[in-house]
Structure formats: structure tokens, C-alpha cells
Image (cartoon, rainbow, N blue to C red):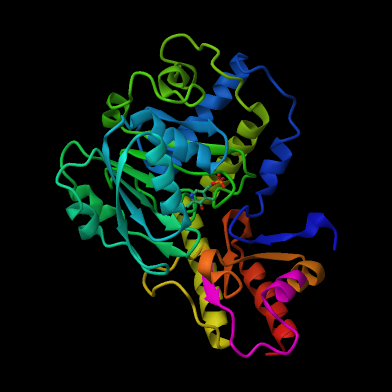
Amino acid sequence: MPHRDRVLMGPGPGNPYPEVIEAFSRPVLGHLDPDFIALLDETNERLRAVWRTQNRLTFPVSGTGSAGMEAAFVNVVAPGDVVVVGVNGVFGERMCDVAERCGAQVIRVEAPWGQPLDAQQLLDAHPAPAIIAVVHAETSTGVRNDIAPLAARPVGTLLLVDCVTSLGGIPVEIDDWSVDIAYSGTQKCLGVPPGLAPLTLSERAVESIVERPQSWYLDLNMIARYVTGEGARAYHHTAPITMIYGLHAGLGALLAEGLEASWARHAECGAALHAGLEARGFRLFAADGHRLPELTTVWLPDDLPAGLDDATIRGRLLDRYGIEIGGGLGEFAGRVWRIGLMGHTARPRNVTLLLGALDELLDR
Ligand SMILES: *Cc1c(COP(=O)(O)O)cnc(C)c1O
């Protein structure tokens, strides 16, 4: 099976939109070329539409989703700040690690893997934290955490949300939910290869940026001059030109389809996969009502045919059918699969292909 035919149904990257691949072959421009600046401005405008925000400081950080996470924390956390972090999977853990490295006093609010966080517990964890930080779509467990109720936080507390696996796939409403800082990644539901981390900050968050962040590369005081065009467009670091072409094209494809239509497509494909798996006797892992359509977690069956285990099945899916799915993390390694339907991958034909392949492999 040639690599070019892979169906990327792991926890990310998903398959890129064809328009994105086409954009990658455009001639490279200089990062201060007026034509490139115009394309960057348009990319940021498209990002505002996808984030559903008016935030002025909205742009793609150079780096993958984790660079977005780091940029989000390192710019607003001052040593000693209280940061409440919701933890119900790998990416909540990563937030704790990043916040602690910035000198934060982290208060963890946990839920078991597979269960959503309790918004009230997050609000009750501290009377006046500097930040409440939550992962919207936990890619390690397939669980969606509710963000809207966190609007009830104390005045002065920033709301920081990881939208790496949610943006483009399920509703994200930065302004309506009063989110102050959010980041994403290009390779999940935006249908672009990995390499950029869309970031957006409210005016309140911009006012909270520390004078001298502990990262030079991710210092928004300097980057803002380049990306917003307020003041001179000064060199800070060379923008990854070709990746920005790709993001521009991916957002173009997404907005041409329509954001709501993309959410509906993800919802339809996710529901079809969930139903197809349950009809075959599989048990879904994530709590009902909080299941992500773009990332399905499912227990491996107890009654697998002889000679088949997690690694063999995933190996055969890849070799015979060109389908990549992901394994479980942590204590669920070998016991749970993670199946992505992200961006351009979220198509009914991919659902049918995977279910058909499982029928053949498992003799169902
Ligand atoms: C993938 C992911 C990240 C990290 O993104 P990278 O692109 O791998 O650096 C962070 N948070 C969540 C929820 C993710 O799914």
C-alpha cells in the first residue's frame, strides 16, 4: 500500500485538505514581502472567523500545538501565580507541567480518565486564581470538557483553554464563552499538517502579559509587533512561510464549506462510527454525552480471535488497508483504541472503510 494512500485515523494528524497540499508548492516569499504580509493578515482574519472572536492578537505560533500551550502559559504566568488546572488525561497533565515550569502554584482538579471535568469543582478550587486552565477536547480519552460554565469565574481570573483537537471539529466560541487565551494545532481538525499553533488572546489577556516572559522565542511582546502590524513590522523570527500558505489554504477550505457544516460533518461521522462500533459489540470508553465525534475511544473486545492483539490488528489495518488508528495511552495502552475523524479525514467513506476492515480482520 503506497504511503500516499494512507487514511490517517489516529489521534492526529488527520489527512490534509487537497487545497493545502497544493498551497505547499507555491513559490516561497520573504517574510517581510508585502504579498506575504497580506497573506498573513488574511490568515489571521480567517483564524478570527474560525475561533469566533474579534481578538486583535490572533495568529499562528511557529511550532506545533505544544508550542501554543507553552506560549499561552509563559506569557501570562508570573512566579507564584495560582493556576487551577483541570486534569482528566495526558494533555491536562502537560498543562500542569508547563505551568509549574513557569513558576505557577498549580492546583489540580481531577476527573477519572474517560469522565468529563466538573466545572463547579474548577470554580470552587480557589477564590481568586490568576488562571483556570482546561483542555476542551482531551485527545488521550476522547472526552469533551464543558467550557461555557467557566464564564462564571471571578473577575480577574483568566480562562485558558486548549483547543488543539476541538477547533474546526466541534463548536468553539471564544468570545461567547469569554475565553481569554486559547491555542490549537494545525494537524487535528483544521486539516493542515503539523507545524503551527493558532493562538488567540483577549484584551484582558494582552494586558496580563508579563514584561519579560521566560521564553525569548515565544515572547508575545515582540511577536505582536510582527503579526498585528501595529507599529513597524519588525523581524523577530522568520515566519514559516510555507506552513502559513498551508494554513491559509486549509482555513479557506474550512470556511468555504462553512464552520457549522464542518461541525455537522464531524458530528455525523462520529455518530456513525460510535453506532457502528456499538452494533459490533464494542464498548465506547468516553462518558456518554461528552464523547468527541473527532476522536473516538473504544475498548478492545475481550473475545478477540486467536492470535490477534492490539498491535497485530493495528499493524494489519495499516498494512492491508492503509488505515492508521491510535493505541491507548498510560494504563489503557493495549486495551483501548483511539480513532480519529479529523478535518479532511472526517468522511462517511472512511467510517465505512474502517468498519468493513474491522469486520474482515475480526471475522464479525
Ligand atoms: C495534539 C495535542 C496537543 C499537542 O500538540 P502537538 O502538535 O503534538 O505539539 C496538545 N493538546 C491536545 C489536546 C492535543 O490533542
Residue 121 or residue 17, whichever sits in front = 121
Residue pictured at 47% horizontal, 65% vertical: 141
Residue pictured at 49% horizontal, 77% vertical: 284
Residue 226 location in percent, x, y?
A: 49, 17
Rendered view: 148 above or below 284 = above
Residue pictured at 76% horizontal, 67% vertical: 318
Residue 145: quarter of image: bottom left
Residue 34 location in percent, x, y?
A: 59, 14
Residue 339: quarter of image: bottom right
Assess whether residue 229 is covered by the magenta stretch.
Answer: no
Residue 24 location in percent, x, y?
A: 72, 36
Residue 109: quarter of image: bottom left
Rendered view: 57 above or below 249 = above
Q: What quarter of the picture does the N terminus occupy?
A: bottom right
Q: Which residues are magenta?
A: 296-315
Q: Residue furthest top?
A: 232
Q: Is residue 362 left or right of residue 175?
A: right
Q: What quarter of the picture does the C terminus occupy?
A: bottom right
Q: Is residue 330 left or right of residue 20?
A: left
Residue 307 location in percent, x, y?
A: 75, 85
Residue 3 or residue 313, whichever sits in front = 313
Q: Is residue 116 left or right of residue 82?
A: right
